[in-house]
Amino acid sequence: MIYLVFHGLSVLWGELVLFAAVGFLAGGLDELLVDFIWLARALWKRSFIYSRHARVSAATLAAPIAPGLIVIFIAAWDEGAVIGAMLRYALAKLDHPDYRIYLGCYPNDQETITAASQIVDPRLRIVVGAKNGPTTKADCLNALWQALLGDEITTGVRAKAIVLHDAEDVVHPDELRVFDTLIERFALVQLPVFPLINRQSRWVAGHYADEFAEAHRKTLVVREALGAALPAAGVGCAFARDMLERIADVNGGHPFDIESLTEDYELGLKIGAFGGQGVLARLPTAHACVQINAYFPATLRAAVRQKARWIIGISLAGYDRLGWSGGLAERWMRLRDRSALIAAVVMCAGYLAVVLGAVLVLAHIMVGTPLPTLAPLIARLVAVNALLMVWRAGVRSYFVTQLYGWREGLIALPRAVVANIIAMMAARRALFQYLQMRRSGIAVWDKTAHIFPAELQFG
């Protein structure tokens, strides 16, 4: 009887290995193609562009042709713990002669309103919406848009660009100068976003550093090079005011879709559909580059909640809302964006195959059951996947090392397991929440708690 049970487990193990191997091969080849495109582009620019022209930096960037008002939108719900420090830092550090910060609050969030009201600065405009929170982030941003339109009529001054930030962001002093210049050529300007390393959460919070290092130094670069629409990250991104107005005109007066949980991502794709061009602005400075930093969720529960929201907004609801459009590159990038659920299933099968394989080997040692074996073709497939995984780990470690140093680059290797566990848990949560959202028809801002660097708090 025991041999029949273990024979059945052996068959199941073989099926899991086959399923996971095919899935890993597809994902591995997909990433390998992105890697090769990035590498080819980097070599081409180094050989033919930077060999003849010095790379533009924050210091050498040309001044804007027609300097204008830059408006920063910050949607805030339950941000009383961080908003005061963030605003003080931003108002003290941002280097631009003409900007205003519009802070969106809710009437039932007195803590956030009180914290922000303690800052007296003519560049800060607190907008308390008519609805109690939380609604969606897009709904809060639309309230800020309406406030801006009213102010433009009153003052006669029209904004040049709208910048999005979150309440926990560490802004860069030069970012508004970059936006002021580049928004004259592009409808969307995105700065790199790099998480801060949280020493108290090296494994959970740290995995965001690994993912963003690769995404904002490689993946978005490839996306831009292929001509696909550039999704906005929701922070450190500037939109041409005229483009937002065009989108608002066909969306009931609202540039941000209130039914979306990832309004920033969708807005970037809509700008592409409207013929606007986006750019990832990577401008070196004396120390690093013009970039946005922030602490990301430090607990497993918070990370799963945040990533579940991303999966719902991009993979599930995003498919319902945006469908498929554009050329081959655009469709390929959307497929990559929406693969989170499939990737989670494949990873789950892979981990189950490893555990079950260990059980079968242990049974072989202890009771003499047959040792599980793979067909030659599947064994070769597993070997190819192993090589692809080594390559993938090396690529990620390289980008993490470039940003955070060799120690974080090494930690990124085992930290990938933590990232995979979070991704699988988030996929499960996202699926159930999405089905519930479809039944209720209500989208809610499922935000996480934020922290602001203590060493930057002053005033």
Image: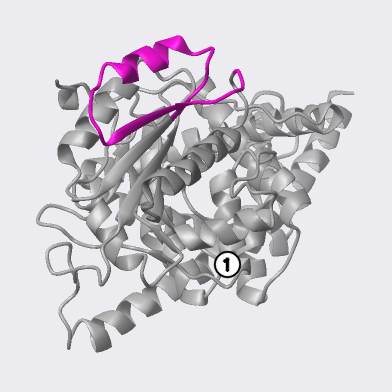
Q: Any magenta on residue 389?
A: no
Q: Nearer the viewer, residue 340 or 245?
A: 245
* Residue nearest the observer in this picture, 326 or 160: 160
Instruction: Judge whether 227 appears above or below 194 on screen.
Output: below
Magenta stretch encompasses residue 131: yes
Between 455 and 148, the one lying in front of the other is 148
Q: Can you give x and y, in whole percent of width and height, for residue 163 in the image?
A: 39, 48
Residue that carries the numbered disc 1 in the rendered image: 272
Check the picture and name the quadrant holding the N terminus.
top right
Which quadrant: the C terminus?
top left
Q: Secondary structure at mark 1?
A: helix
Q: Residues within 10 Å of mark 1 (few under 14, many from 20)?
A: many
Q: Residue 143 appears at what percent x and percent y?
A: 54, 35
Q: Residue at x 52, y 75 (%)?
A: 227
Q: Nearer the viewer, residue 75 or 429?
A: 75
The segment highlighted magenta reads 104-132
Q: Residue at x 27, y 29 (%)?
A: 87
Image coordinates for residue 51, horizontal then vertical, percent: 18, 85
Residue located at (26% from left, 63% from top): 67
Amino acid at pointer 1? Gly
Answer with left or right where residue 179 lies relative to residue 163. Answer: left
Q: How many marks?
A: 1
Residue 326 shown left or right of residue 454 in the figure: right
**Residue at the image position 66 percent from the left and 39 percent from the top:** 258
Tell me, yes or no, if residue 167 can be seen here.
yes
